[in-house]
Image: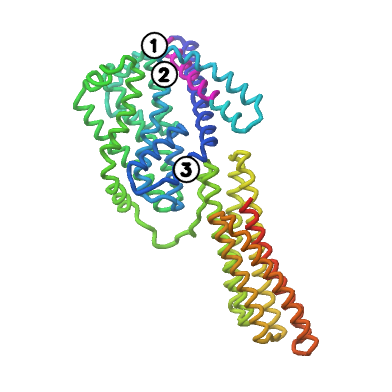
């Protein structure tokens, strides 16, 4: 082979691989965005039943066409406490089964029908260009991605067919099972997709190429791809919580143990391929795809009863940190790919933010009533924490907005507005600390009657916050009349308290210099009620 021929071969092979990967990306990313509600409903059905969780993992991966994405989602769910390690273990096993769908699709390239499937590129792009609906446009890109997968496979197969003798001569010499196993691990870790590696192997078989002597050799590479696929989840767990890292380790252990068992089986039965899949299916491409599916199903059946053992082993190997623990959060970047799930987590984080802001207000209120300036520092710490949580939510919203559909933008906008209203509560807490300082510096005194009146108004605010919190968590529109009634009571309290204060001023019971603090304080309580009401209105939209 001349240098120019070799260059042409490599260019065509790499071009085919690139087209294939672009097709997989278009297919996966757009299905993932369209299927977020289905993914959410699947994961909301998590239960103690192992088979249910296997089905959830398998169905999710079959929908979005990527076990890597599913496993990363599972790691994220474990990290924020949506699911536990026992559920995650069964889901990971299911995800391994679901990922074999891509290889089954690739195996269709051995049949003439795939030539007609390639026209879906044109159809899909036209749909994307002509249609205005966001969902329809994404459906067009899915069709285009499906067509590109087969074009890429065709390019790879054609390049290898044109140089079959030379390539066959190279691959015939590779017969060492451990070397083939390592090749599978390395290639999959490099492209971070076992489906991509398996599809390239299938493209080789369509070109008439065999690895080694055409026996079990190709299966060793397939076994290696299953371990290489763990790299994505392992990388995603870096910097995550203890349980997230345990979930990634379980994924690695499951695939390693399964590959080790099948490696020994293939080594002991050199004619395994010929006696099984070689007899059952005519197409070598189908044989490889079916082995890939069989391997993952068999491993799940074998290891599912021992899923608790995997969990306990991961807990032994990765100990819980006892110090330097970061504050818990419901936000995890791994979930950004599923907008509806990310929005659900954001709503939980809103509760954390509102609890923190209200905690600052309560501390500031106690500081004022008791004229205790030692509570000012704790109040400022809570306000600072609220600011940090607020920044995290806003940054998360920005990243989510870049990946979300138009239909999700309204929810994202409402959450952003709610963050602003919650932070106004923290500002009111800060205002209360200033009232406390002024009262201490000017030696202002408020009678027990005044304190009781303010306390009654604060109780209404607490009632309204309880309803607001329920609204954020449950989105119960039935609470709205009660919320409106409580806000009206707070408004009426403000007027009554100010009227009473003016009467006391006229009768000489209150010092005039206390007016500024008292009126501003009562007005701030009314503002707090307003912001809580705005939050419930945003949630109900």
Determine the residue located farthest toward the left in the rendered image: 268
Q: Quadrant of the N terminus?
A: top left
Question: CB of mark 2 within 8 Å of CB of mark 1?
Answer: no
Instruction: Tell me which corner region of the image, top left, top right, bottom left or bottom right, holds residue 302.
Output: top left
Color theme of the render = rainbow
**Residue 385 appears in the picture as rendered:** no
Q: For the residue carrying disc 2, how many other residues have a C-alpha within 10 Å: few (<14), some (14-19), or many (20+)?
A: some
Instruction: Tell me which corner region of the image, top left, top right, bottom left or bottom right, holds residue 219.
Output: top left
Q: Position of residue 163 (x, y in %)?
A: 42, 11
The residue beneath circle 2 is 108
User: Would residue 440 be found to the left or right of residue 319 on screen?
Assistant: right
**Residue at left 39%, top 62%?**
322
In reply to whether residue 159 is colored magenta, the answer given is yes
Residues drawn in magenta: 143-163
Q: Secondary structure at mark 3?
A: helix
Q: Position of residue 241 (x, y in %)?
A: 43, 53
Q: Nearer the viewer, mark 2 or mark 1?
A: 2
Question: CB of mark 3 within 8 Å of CB of mark 2?
Answer: no
The residue beneath circle 1 is 164
Report, in whole angstroms, how far the alpha carbon at label 2 lies from the one at label 1. Answer: 21 Å
The residue beneath circle 3 is 41
- Observer-nearest of 51 and 213: 51
Q: For the residue carrying disc 3, how many other residues have a C-alpha within 10 Å: few (<14), some (14-19), or many (20+)?
A: some
Q: Secondary structure at mark 2?
A: helix
In reply to whether residue 186 is colored magenta, the answer given is no
Q: Counting residues from the N terminus, which is met first, the one under dot 2 or under dot 1?
A: 2
Q: Is residue 250 above or below residue 170?
A: below
Instruction: Tell me which corner region of the image, top left, top right, bottom left or bottom right, holds residue 355.
Output: bottom right
Q: Nearer the viewer, mark 3 or mark 2?
A: 3
Report, in whole angstroms, how far the alpha carbon at label 3 lies from the one at label 1. Answer: 48 Å
């Amino acid at each position: 082979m001349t240098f120019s021929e070799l260059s042409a071969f490599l260019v065509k092979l790499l071009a085919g691989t690139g087209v294939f990967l672009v097709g997989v990306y278009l297919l996966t990313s757009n299905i993932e965005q369209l299927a977020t509600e289905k993914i959410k409903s699947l994961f909301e059905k998590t239960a103690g039943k192992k088979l249910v969780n296997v089905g959830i993992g398998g169905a999710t991966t079959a929908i979005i066409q990527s076990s890597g994405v599913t496993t990363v989602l599972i790691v994220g769910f474990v990290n924020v406490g949506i699911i536990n390690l026992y559920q995650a273990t069964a889901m990971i096993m299911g995800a391994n089964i679901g990922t074999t769908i891509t290889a089954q699709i690739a195996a269709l390239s051995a049949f003439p029908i795939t030539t007609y499937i390639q026209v879906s590129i044109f159809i899909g792009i036209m749909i994307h260009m002509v249609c205005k609906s966001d969902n329809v446009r994404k459906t067009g890109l899915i069709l285009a991605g499906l067509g590109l997968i087969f074009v890429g496979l065709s390019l790879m197969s054609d390049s290898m067919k044109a140089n079959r003798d030379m390539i066959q001569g190279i691959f015939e010499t590779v017969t060492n099972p451990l070397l083939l196993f390592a090749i599978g691990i390395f290639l999959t870790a490099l492209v971070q997709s076992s489906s991509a590696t398996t599809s390239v192997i299938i493209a080789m078989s369509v070109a008439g190429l065999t690895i080694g002597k055409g026996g079990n050799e190709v299966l060793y590479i397939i076994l290696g791809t299953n371990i290489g696929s763990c790299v994505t989840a392992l990388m995603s767990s870096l910097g995550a919580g203890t349980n997230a890292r345990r979930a990634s380790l379980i994924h690695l252990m499951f695939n390693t143990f399964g590959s080790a068992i099948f490696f020994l089986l293939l080594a002991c039965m050199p004619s395994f391929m010929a006696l099984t899949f070689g007899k059952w299916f005519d197409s070598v491409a189908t044989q490889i795809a079916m082995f890939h599916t069989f391997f993952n199903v068999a491993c799940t059946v074998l290891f599912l009863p021992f899923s608790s053992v995997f969990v306990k082993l991961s807990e032994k190997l990765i100990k819980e940190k006892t110090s330097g623990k970061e504050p818990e959060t419901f936000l995890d970047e791994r979930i950004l790919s599923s907008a509806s799930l990310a929005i659900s987590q954001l709503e939980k984080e809103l509760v954390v933010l509102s609890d923190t802001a209200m905690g600052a207000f309560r501390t500031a209120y106690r500081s004022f009533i008791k004229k205790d300036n030692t509570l000012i520092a704790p109040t400022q710490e809570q306000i600072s924490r609220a600011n940090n949580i607020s920044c995290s939510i806003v940054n998360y919203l920005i990243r989510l907005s870049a990946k979300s559909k138009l239909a999700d933008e309204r929810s994202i906008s409402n959450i952003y507005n709610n963050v602003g209203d919650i932070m106004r509560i923290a500002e009111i807490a800060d205002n209360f600390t200033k009232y406390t300082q002024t009262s201490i510096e000017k030696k202002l005194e408020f009678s027990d009657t005044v304190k009781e009146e303010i306390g009654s108004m604060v109780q209404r605010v607490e009632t309204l916050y309880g309803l607001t919190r329920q609204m954020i968590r449950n989105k119960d529109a039935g609470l709205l009349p009660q919320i409106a009634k409580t806000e009206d009571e707070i408004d009426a309290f403000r007027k009554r308290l100010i009227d009473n204060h003016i009467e006391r001023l006229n009768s000489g019971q209150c010092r005039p210099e206390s007016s500024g603090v008292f009126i501003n304080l009562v007005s701030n309580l009314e503002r707090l009620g307003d912001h809580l009401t705005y939050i419930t209105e945003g949630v109900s939209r």
